[in-house]
Image: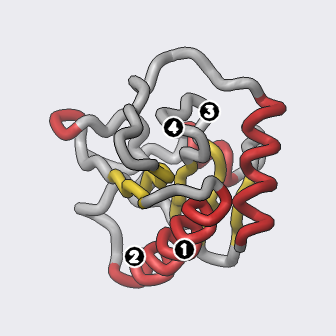
Amino acid sequence: MTYDPNNIFAKILRGEIPCHKTYEDEHTLAFMDVMPQVEGHCLVIPKVGSRNLLDAELSTLTPLMATVQKVARAAKTAFKADGVQIRQYNEPAAGQTVFHLHFHIMPMNEGQAIRPHAGKMADQGLLAKQAEMIRNAL
């Protein structure tokens, strides 16, 4: 399978679709998931088009993982979480639905349930507030 430059995350990178940014540098972008499974659920993507972890270059993965760690620490702090769950899917059989490499960051508390990744979008005002909380914790 090849990378589709018209996927939703590529459109976000090009500014065609808005997002609630939590962090950005020359290599990566982090933003709130519009269908969060927990409070503070955000995504980290590379700015280079890669379908998933299986086709990404090491030069893409190195700064991407540094951003995943940075944003995960900030999300844990911002949401006073006990821990952070990091998820990453590769190909449809594994649950990947957007074919641009991305990591899910979910701040978690002991015993917390994860909501389904449903088709209903979260309130944009709430996502903006949560993005600000993470930015402030960076």
Q: Which corner quadrant holds the C terminus?
A: bottom right
Sequence-first tag of 2 and 3: 3
Q: Which residue is mark 1?
A: 67
Residue type at the position of mark 1: Thr
Viewer-proximal residue among 95 and 77: 77
- Residue at 59% across / 60% down in the picture? 75
* Residue 25 drawn at (x, y percent): 69, 75
Q: Mark 2 vs mark 1: give the one in front.
A: 1
Earlier along the polypeptide chain: callout 2 or callout 1? Answer: 2
In the rendered structure, which disc, 4 or 1, sits on the residue that comes first in sequence?
4
Q: Quadrant of residue 71?
A: bottom right
Mark toward the viewer: 2 or 3: 3
Residue toward you, 90 or 48: 90
Residue 48 locus on image (x, y percent): 52, 66
Within 10 angstroms of label 4, few (less than 14), some, or many (20 or more) residues? Answer: some
Q: Quadrant of residue 86?
A: bottom left
Q: Amino acid at mark 4?
A: Val
Q: Amino acid at mark 3?
A: Val
Q: Which residue is mark 2?
A: 61
- Is residue 40 rendered to the left or right of residue 91? right
Counting residues from the N terminus, which is met first, the one under dot 4 or under dot 2? 4
Q: CA distance from mark 2 to mark 1?
A: 10 Å
Q: Residue furthest top?
A: 120
Q: Name the residue carrying label 3.
A: 34
Residue displayed at 26% across by 35% down: 95
Res 24 visible:
yes
Q: Secondary structure at mark 3?
A: loop
Tell me the residue that label 4 is attached to.
Answer: 38
